[in-house]
Amino acid sequence: MRKFLLTVAWLRMLPSLRQIFSSLGALMDIGYAFVVLTGVGRMDLIVKGWQDFGSRKPVLNLTPSPSKLEYIFFHNVFSQGKKMAETDVKQQIKDYVQTMHEQGILDHNFENVQNLQCQENPHFVLEIIDMFCRDAEICIAEMAKYVDEPVVDYAKVTGFIHQLKGSSSSVGGCRIVVACRELRKATENKMKEGCLEACNKIKREYFVVRDNLNAIAKMERSIHTDDAMAGIF
Amino acid sequence: MSSNNTENWMKDIGVLDHPSGVGEGSTTSAATNITALVVDDDSVNQMIHSKILENLGIQNQVVRNGKEAVDLHSSGNNFDLILMDMDMPVMNGIEATRKLRAMGVRSIIAGVSTCTRDEREQKEFMEAGLDDFQEKPLTTPKVVSILQKVNKKC
C-alpha cells in the first residue's frame, strides 16, 4: 500500500503525465493501483524512463524490460493521453490567435504562416517566430541607435524601418507596421523628436507582439514535447 | 486556397505530374518542372517565400540582394520565376531587374514590395522589366497567380 501511494505520488509529479491524469481522472488511479498491486515491481524504473523523456534524453533503457502488461498499459494510456493533449493544445493555439485578432495585435497574415506548416516541417511556425524576434530586436536596436545620435542618419533609419515593416507584416504584426509608418513619416520630415517618439512606440508594440508570439511558441513546443515522449512507444 | 485546388490547377496546366495510370495504386509527384529564385534581404520573408514555393513543389534558391541575383545568372543559372524584392542593400530590385533584362534574362520577374510604396517608384520598378507586381506579404494564392503567367509564357 505504501509502495502504491509513493508510486502514484511520484508519477503525479511528472508534468506531462499530469496532463494525462487530469484528463483521465479517477480511471488512472484505478489503473495504476491495478498495475502496482498485481506485482508489477518495476514501476520505479518506468518512472525513471519517463523522467528521461521529460529531460529530452532518449529513450527507455530499462532493465529488466517492462512486462507485457506494463508495456500495453502505459502505451494505451500514454497514446490516448497524448492525442487528447495535442488536440487540446491546437485548439488553445487557435483560440489564442483568434483573441489576438480581436485585440488587433495580429492580423490574418499570422494564419498564413501557420498554414505553411506541414508534416515535413512541423517546426516552421517556431522557426519563423524565433527568426522574427531575433531580427526585429536587431532592427529596433539599430534604429534607436541612429535616432539617438546628435545628427540623425535618416537614410540608415529608413533602411531598418523597411526591414522591420516587411517582416512584421509577414507575421501579422499589424501594429508594428503602423508604428513603422509613423517613424517613416518622421524621417521624411526629418523630425528628430518625432523619430524618437515613433521609435519608442515601435518598441512598445514589438514587446506586445513578441510576448504573444512567445506564448504561441510555448504552446507549439508543448505539442512537440509530447511527440518526443510518444516516441518511447 | 485549399491544397487540393492548388494541386488540381497545377495538374491541369501541366506543371504538376498527373497520376500515372488509373486506379488506387497511382500516386502524384510532388515536384513541378518550374524553378524559382527568391531575392529578398529579410530572413523572415526569405523563409516564408521559399516555403510557399516549396509547398507548391517548386525548387527554389534564395539570395539576399540584387547583386547576388545578377551574379547567379552571370554564372549560368536560369530560373523560370524570380521573386524580386524592391528595397535591398548593395543592389535594389529596380537596378537588378534592369541588369537582368539587359543580360537577356527572359524569366518571369515578379516584383514584391509593401503596399505603401511611392507610386512613382512602383512605376519605375515595373518599367525596369517586371512581368508582375505583388504586394507583400506574399501568400500562396498570389504566387499561384504569378505562376499562371509562367505557364502562359511557356
Image (cartoon, coloured by chain):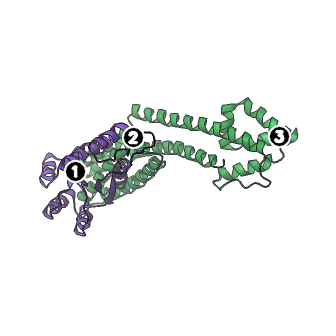
Report whether A4 appears left or right of A25: right
Return the mark for residue A36: 3
Name the one closer to the observer, A86 or B145. Answer: B145
The amino acid marked with disc number 1 is Ala
Q: Earlier in the sequence, mark 2 or mark 1?
A: 2
How would you rate the neighbour count of disc 2 (Cα within 10 Å): few for under 14, some for 14-19, many for 20 or more? few
Q: Are marks 2 and 3 in contact (CB under 8 Å)?
A: no
How would you rate the neighbour count of disc 1 (Cα within 10 Å): few for under 14, some for 14-19, many for 20 or more? many
Q: Position of residue B122 (x, y in %)?
A: 16, 49
Specify whether disc 2 shares its chain with disc 1: yes
Q: Quadrant of residue B68?
A: bottom left
Rendering colour (chain B): purple
- Identify the residue at the far bottom of this view: B75
Rendering colour (chain A): green
Residue A10 showing in the rendered view: no
Q: Position of residue A42 (x, y in %)?
A: 81, 48
Return the mark for residue A172: none
Q: Quadrant of residue A147?
A: bottom left
Q: Quadrant of the N terminus of chain A?
A: top right
Name the one closer to the observer, B33 or A4. Answer: B33
Chain of the residue where label 3 is placed in the rendered structure: A
Q: CA distance from mark 2 to mark 1?
A: 37 Å
* Residue ID at (47%, 49%): A120
Q: CA distance from mark 2 to mark 3?
A: 55 Å
Q: Which residue is mark 2?
A: B22
How would you rate the neighbour count of disc 3 (Cα within 10 Å): few for under 14, some for 14-19, many for 20 or more? many
Q: Secondary structure at mark 3?
A: helix
The amino acid marked with disc number 2 is Val
The amino acid marked with disc number 3 is Val
Q: Secondary structure at mark 2?
A: loop
